[in-house]
Amino acid sequence: MLVEGKTVLITGAARGIGRATALLMAAEGADVAVADILPEVESTAEAVNRTGRRSLAAVFDIADPVQVRDGVRKIVQQLGNIHVLVNNAGIVNNIARLTKMTHESWSREISVNLSGAFNMIKEVIGPMREMKWGRIINISSLAATGGLDRQAGYAASKAGLLGLTKTVALEHARDGITCNAVLPGLIETELVRQMPDEIRKASVYMIPTRRMGTMEEVGRLIVFLASDGAAYINGEEIHIDGGLRLNTTTLGSRKEVTEAGR
Ligand code: NAD
């Protein structure tokens, strides 16, 4: 059991990678608090409870520091101090070239994806320091290192998360706390499955493994980073993308270029 006896808090756990990670954490022995802006997060808590582990669902907007403070306080009252924080909640609400991007949608992406993680860390770091043990795992994106066409707000927020990750790692290494970032490529979540078929096919062709990652593959990496075995991994940015970041598959091959164009 990789996280036995630990209390984990995962944001954005109503669905997708957050929900899958919650169930994997429970399978590895943790009690799991799940937070989301959507009330459907209750069903994740019920699923965790069915595994025999304790769970609690909390509905709040991570972009609002007051809601975060109240939400985390309630969780701690019921489940005890948080040993592992997974900052997973994130949004893409802003697919447009920079010239068409509104200030409002830019700000919301930064507020949720970057300030949301800051708000959460602020609430859990004090008790982690007292316990002399803590794991913070920030879910960034391949977009942080590669940029993303028509998603300046998203890419900038996810790149900002890397700076936050490394600074938390530096400031709290001596407190027994590690802070790492996970950078998924294209992961087959419920939402990604709904992409139009031709876009899915073209996207998968760009990935050297010729398949998307699964939610469980990302979840298993997060669980490992939360475990005692990962104590010396700190301030790291770990891609999990099937090699997509290498992006060299079509160079120098006429056949590959022709097939990609189909
Ligand atoms: P998802 O949209 O399926 O789940 C995200 C969850 O976050 C949702 O349940 C949503 O309600 C919640 N959320 C959104 N805004 C919130 C807020 N303000 N407060 C609280 N909760 C909020 O996404 P996913 O695909 O499972 O992605 C999870 C994380 O992984 C995100 O940070 C995303 O950017 C990142 N990521 C995903 C992929 C991918 O291919 N799926 C690739 C790279 C990075």
Image (tube, grey):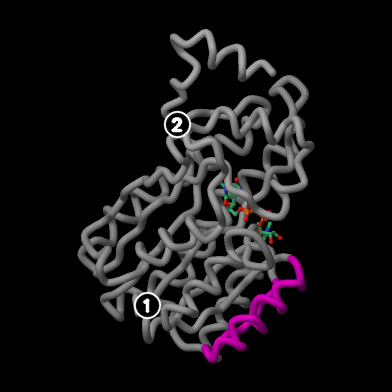
Give the class, few, some or many, for how many residues have Cα within 10 Å of label 2's Cα (few <14, many ≥20): some
Q: Quadrant of ligand 1?
A: bottom right
Which of the pair 186/177 is nearer the observer? Answer: 186
Which comes sooner in the sequence, label 1 or label 2?
1
Q: What element carries label 1?
A: loop
At label 2, the amino acid type is: Arg
Type of amino acid under label 1: Val
Q: Find residue 3 and name its label.
A: 1
Report how many numbered discs are placed on residues in the image. 2
Q: Nearer the viewer, residue 239 or 172?
A: 239
On the question of residue 101 being in view, the answer is yes
- When the figure is inspected, residue 162 is found, relative to residue 63, above or below; the finding is above
x and y, in percent, of residue 22 in the image: 54, 72
Where is residue 156? Give x, y as percent.
Answer: 55, 35
Is 216 one of the magenta-colored residues? no
Q: To which quarter of the image does residue 105 belong?
A: top right
The percent position of residue 145, horizontal first and vertical second, equals 45, 33
Report which residue position mark 2 lands on.
245
Give the image location of residue 155, x and y in percent: 57, 35
- How far, Cα to Cα, is label 1 from label 2? 30 Å
Q: Which residue is drawn at 65% across and 79% down?
A: 57
> Quick check: marks 1 and 2 in contact, CB under 8 Å?
no
| Magenta range | 38-59
